[in-house]
Image: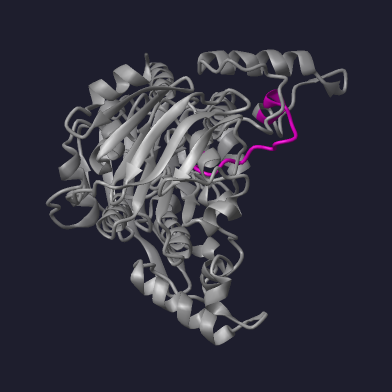
Amino acid sequence: MSPGAPILSLRGIRKSYGPTEVLHGVDFDVHPGEVVALLGENGAGKSTLSNIIAGSISPSAGQMTWLGRPYAPANPREALDLGIGLIHQELRLLPNLTIAENVHVGRYPIRSGLVDRARMNRDAAEQLRRLGLNLPATRRVAGLSTANQQLIEIAKALARDARLLILDEPTAALGGAEVDLLFGQIEKLRSEGVGIIYISHRLEEIRRITDRIVVMRDGSKVQEFDKGDVPVRTIVEAMVGRSLERMFPAMPEPKDEVTLSVEGLTSPEGDFRDVSFTVRRGEILGIAGLVGAGRTELVRAITGADPLAAGKVKLDGADITLRHPWEAIRHGIVLVPEDRKQQGLILDHSIAENIGYCNREAVSSGMLISARRLREFAAANIRRFGVKGTGRQNAGEMSGGNQQKVVLAKWLARDPKVVVLDEPTRGIDVGARSSIYEIIRDLAAEGRSVIVVSSDLEEVLGVSHRIVVLSKGRQAGILSREEASDVSVMELATS
């Protein structure tokens, strides 16, 4: 390599599936010690380009060079051996193996013909320390939080001594403290000359961590910024190809009457304790806090998915403390979970089937499902929520934003009184986020009570009338829209 040359260079990269071309002659470079943001809406071509670089798929045309030499990996293992690692947005850990076994999977250290477990555990523990993850390397992955599993995925990649890392939504499941730890590690890697391609829908992160921004739209590179500190509005307009008046829609004023109230809620495991608040009709109540504060555990308990040790849940003044999700559903309380792929959808079933499973009374004729009624009911809700797809299409074939709309559609078709949204825009592009925010606004305008849990502070500030802040399982405070700011929320969250 000549001085100043990129470690990775792509020229005229194209990719076609049959007659459909999804990448149109993309040029892309990464230099040593550079963090390049690769941005675009879902379907813009980011994942296709990343998978070409990582050896998962081959380009139809174009050339790549790596460290100054022609580069055409036949598979991901070959790319890894050459020093290029891709950390996927979707977790790919083996739950029944230990953290150390996951970090070293496929390349266990051997001594005298046997796996050297002492070395494997020692090396994995060092990677965990680098990321500030206080877990024993010998612990099984099963049961760990999404945030901890994401950090283990990152440790797994860092342990390979890669010269180039592709981070696909690495902070989607992380809170503020964990993001800071990750960014500290990225800074260290940058100083060591490691190149990083950083893919994220959290645009405020881009300004903090990246040196350069490449924007893709409809399979083409449409804009490149030679610095990372670019206004979010400018980035968004480049991504969607139009001017945006605002990120968040104006929220309607809530009514005075209380729909939902919780009193002294306490978890058996201590995830949260003595939490009390109310939600009015037409109000959007945000729940904020760092990862591990008990946000998800709290809303799961409110909706009957997890047990309570103490406290009451009241709907319209009547005690309905729930023991099963179906009790919540019968009372008109629905939960859109944080992990739509594992908990919200059956990915290898059709959109129509996923919508119908929660609305059997609307699609049944007697004891049997009516194919005609299912088709018509699904089509109506697909139109209502702007899902880009047909009822026959499998849910797993859709983008993250459209999958989330299907989860919303199947529950909102039941006409609920209370809608609980846990991380409603995680892993969703800016354009799809905007449509989700409009759905949230419309729910409030229709008089429904909405609870939004989000790790994205800008999001929870943008959509909420009031914000409950949790800190280490306790209720640190409730802020009005006028009182709430990134500073006031974080002060409570870290108290």
Task: Tell me the magenta residue range.
Answer: 87-102
Q: Quadrant of the C terminus?
A: top left
Does the rendering let one see residue 216?
Answer: yes
Query: Residue most toward the bottom?
Result: 372
Identify which residue, 101 or 356, lies in the foreground.
356
Examine the structure image and report whether residue 98 is included in the region drawn in magenta: yes
Q: Residue at x 29, y 30 (%)?
A: 210
Where residue 132 appears, as percent x and y from the top left, is 51, 15
Q: Is residue 183 left or right of residue 398?
A: left
Image height check: is 394 above or below 32?
below
Q: Residue at x 54, y 47 (%)?
A: 55
Q: Is residue 453 left or right of residue 461?
A: right
Image height check: is 122 above or below 234?
above
Identify which residue, 19 or 270, lies in the foreground.
270
Identify which residue, 373 or 449, lies in the foreground.
449
Does the rendering let one see residue 31?
Answer: no
Image height check: is 42 above or below 183?
below
